Image (cartoon, grey):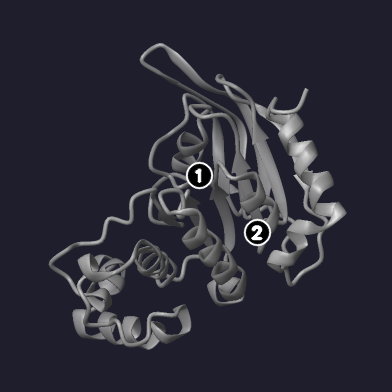
């Protein structure tokens, strides 16, 4: 394993329109690690993820990938909160869209997309239009489109945030099952403490704005993870620490 972090922010600060959003945020993500970011609403989680994606530059500090400055977008895969599926494209055409945007010929892109559908639970849905899919299926399509780019870093901004509780739990379990397929370093933004503990190797808690890292918590639960671990004492202890850092428990 490389000694260099796969992704890092060094003293990152962001100010927009006179509003100080991030203040000296330091984080390191090791190769192959799954890190979750949680924090109060408006604390700058999505802003930080956008910086890690290279979509904008910080007001101060720096962002690095493999020890070098992250100077432009496109070096990592980024999935925003909305699935952004194009209604006039079929499932397979939507999955192939990212590849086409990087210059892969349309035929080859759609062939690769079609070959990936079964592994992500989308077999038989290649010709279906997005409007005919459930919210959970749309999320799978969007995640597969992002993952198929083959980048070694995958940034997910609340991919299941708009789903109902039962659908969300089903997708959490599904993501646990396909994590090895993704073969990437993953950073996930979520408001769900249980989701962060269940999925991540480490959870970073951001403070109120202007945000700093208030807690860096290792999730020392065995892998492979299962939903049943949510009922264990170890899970409850981790949850209590995170809720305390968020100010929910006083």
Query: Where's residue 164, x and y in %?
Result: 45, 54
Q: Which residue is more in the foreground, 124 or 21?
A: 124
Residues under labels 2 and 1: Cα distance? 20 Å
Query: Dot 2, how many residues are within 10 Å of its Cα: few (below 14), some (14-19), or many (20+)?
Result: many
- Write the residue at 77% across / 62% down: 229
Question: Quarter of the image containing the N terminus?
Answer: bottom right
Query: Where's residue 236, x and y in %?
Result: 80, 48
Is residue 56 toward the left or the right of residue 239 in the image?
left
Question: Quarter of the image containing the C terminus?
Answer: top right
Do we see residue 183 in this rendering?
no
Is residue 41 toward the left or the right of residue 204 in the image?
left
Residue that sits furthest to the left in the current view = 88
Image quadrant in which you'd find residue 181: bottom right
Rendered position, 112 above or below 151: below
Query: Where's residue 18, x and y in %?
Result: 40, 11
Element type at marker 2? Answer: helix
Dot placed on the residue nearer the N-terminal end, 2 or 1? 1
Q: Which mark is residue 190?
A: none
Residue that sits furthest to the right in the current view = 233
Q: Which residue is more in the foreground, 159 or 155?
A: 159
Rendered position, 72 above or below 91: above
Q: Which mark is residue 199?
A: 2
Residue that sits furthest to the top in the current view = 18
- Write the residue at 37% across / 69% down: 137
Is residue 13 toward the left or the right of residue 35 in the image?
left
Instruction: Tell me if label 2 and label 1 are in contact, CB under 8 Å.
Output: no
Element type at marker 1? Answer: helix
Do we see residue 117 in this rendering?
yes
Q: Which residue is more in the foreground, 131 or 157?
A: 131
Q: Which residue is mark 1?
A: 52
- Write the residue at 62% across / 30% down: 25
Query: Where's residue 87, x and y in %?
Result: 17, 63
């Amino acid at each position: 394993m490389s000694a260099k972090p796969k992704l890092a922010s060094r003293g990152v600060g962001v100010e927009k329109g006179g509003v100080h959003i991030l203040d000296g945020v330091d984080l390191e993500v090791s190769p192959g690690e799954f890190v979750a970011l949680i924090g109060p609403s408006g604390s700058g989680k999505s802003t930080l993820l956008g910086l890690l994606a290279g979509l904008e530059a910080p007001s101060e500090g720096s962002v690095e990938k493999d020890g070098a400055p992250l100077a432009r977008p496109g070096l990592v895969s980024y999935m925003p909160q909305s699935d952004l599926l194009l209604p006039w494209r079929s499932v397979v055409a939507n999955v192939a869209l990212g590849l086409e945007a990087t210059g892969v010929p349309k035929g080859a892109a759609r062939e690769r997309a079609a070959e990936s559908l079964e592994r992500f639970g989308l077999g038989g849905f290649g010709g279906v239009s997005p409007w005919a899919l459930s919210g959970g299926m749309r999320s799978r399509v969007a995640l597969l489109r992002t993952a198929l780019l083959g980048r070694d870093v995958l940034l997910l901004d609340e991919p299941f945030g708009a789903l109902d509780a039962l659908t969300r739990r089903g997708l959490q379990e599904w993501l646990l099952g396909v994590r090895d397929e993704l073969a990437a370093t993953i950073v996930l933004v979520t408001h769900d403490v249980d989701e962060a503990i269940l999925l991540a190797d480490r959870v970073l808690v951001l403070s109120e704005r202007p945000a700093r890292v208030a807690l860096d918590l290792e999730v020392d639960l065995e892998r492979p993870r299962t939903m049943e671990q949510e009922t264990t004492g170890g899970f409850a202890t981790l949850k209590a620490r995170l809720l305390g850092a968020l100010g929910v428990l006083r």
